[in-house]
Amino acid sequence: MPIRGLTDRESVTPRLTPIGQIRKGTKDEQGKMIDLEYFRFIAKGPKREAVQAAFEVAYGKEPRLVRVVTPYPTVEENWVTWFEQWGDSGLIHRCDGKYMVQWLDENKRYVLDYELEQKRLCPYCSGERPRTKKDSGCSEVGRLIVAIPELLGIGFLGYVTVITTSKNDLVNITASLLDTEQKARIVGREFLLAGVPFAMHRVEENIGIRYKKKNGDTVKTKGDKWMIRLDPTQKWGQQMLQEAMDRAIGLPAPTPVALPEPQVDLDTGEVLGVYEEPDELPNPFDEIEEPGAPGDNGHSPTQEAQPMTTQEETARRTQWEEYYARTWAEAQALDLDADPLPADGTAMIDEIKAASKELAERVKHAKLLKRWRELWDKGQTLGIEVAGITDDTPNDEIERKGKELAGKIAEAEAQIPVEQGELL
């Protein structure tokens, strides 16, 4: 049974595991905060080194664009904004710009009032306590909860918090999320923002700046600042527009395509398919046509292959880097020694491609060996005599013998009485 006020559904907000933060600034040598022109990723948790490396393989150390997905249905679940005051020992108080929702009492214990039953005024927002240079009070902060597909795709299941204290960011992100939620609601999308893909950019904008001079006068001016832009991907936007147009003219909403479910080994819980799929693990970039030799461009043999544009080359490089990041993370999980790609982006596309294929083959070999040992142990339990293999046995030989052994195991298990089978 749940504990009232602690583990009941009303007291706990469902959430994923935090695996990192994305911030806009950092501290200089004097400890002063400075704004950056790119996103700064900080991995968290017990696997932070692997998460940090995987992110940097996918985006580099100074990305201005990160692809994200909102995990929850509503704006409020994905985007949390408050006025907050922090001290050396942590949070002092949190408010909504008028009433406090969390604060320290005289015993240094937090009082929570998110339902605003007490309606305790914030002393700074109400003007009761003036803001000074030494006591600036509370200020705005926004936390956007997102998932990063490149990390999810290699098994790092969790959310990343994007933190900003810019008023312009707060307004722009809110406006974008509200607009996206509204479009999803119009077309009848059941889960609204859950699973919506966004492109998150750092963009230099000329914005209004307000500051106080030493004599107390307020000065208004303008300056260039690097802001956050959060936009749904073009593909998603086109899909929503098409669905809205179809609804407007009375066409039925598109029927979602049901994807085949993978077969699962009921004994081990492992997803099967190693022996049924002798090729490499599914690679979404297999459809990318690699440039062939001159004349091998799918047209006339007399035509020369066209060189890639800079945009195509960048896209190709990014795709192979992402593939290597996923394969590298799998290698780490299998305790295989593998170096991440150079973080400075000096590796050539052909080098990344060759390294990816080589590492994918090693990962596949390790998985085949692991599966073979499981089958071999089970075969020994059933009294099946079969020749073993070595670590140097080629993949196709392991696959062939694995199929044979799996067939023998299935035949042997079919002959076992039910009572004895339950003991096994």
Image (cartoon, grey):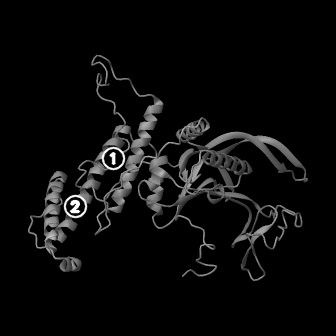
Q: At 9% from the left edge and 65% from the top edge, which residue is drawn?
A: 386
Q: Is residue 66 visible?
A: yes
The tag earlier along the polypeptide, 2 or 1, is 1
Q: At 56% from the left edge and 65% from the top edge, which residue is drawn?
A: 15
Question: Picture coordinates of residue 360 (x, y %)?
Answer: 30, 50
Left or right position of 149 against 410: right
User: Which quadrant: the N terminus?
Assistant: bottom right
Q: Quadrant of residue 245?
A: top right
Left or right position of 334 against 20: left
Is label 1 in a helix, a strand or a loop?
helix
Q: Which mark is residue 176?
A: none
Please say if 168 is above or below 348.
Answer: below
Q: Which mark is residue 356?
A: 1
Q: Residues within 10 Å of mark 2 (few under 14, many from 20)?
A: many
Please say if 166 is above or below 268.
Answer: above
Amino acid on which the number 1 mark rests in the picture? Ser
CA separation in Å, label 2 and label 1: 20 Å
Question: Picture coordinates of residue 415 (x, y %)?
Answer: 13, 71
Question: Picture coordinates of residue 282 (x, y %)?
Answer: 33, 48
Q: At 66% from the left edge and 40% from the top edge, which residue is drawn?
A: 204
Q: Which residue is mark 2?
A: 369
Q: Quadrant of residue 413?
A: bottom left
Amino acid on which the number 2 mark rests in the picture? Leu
Q: Is residue 392 visible?
A: no
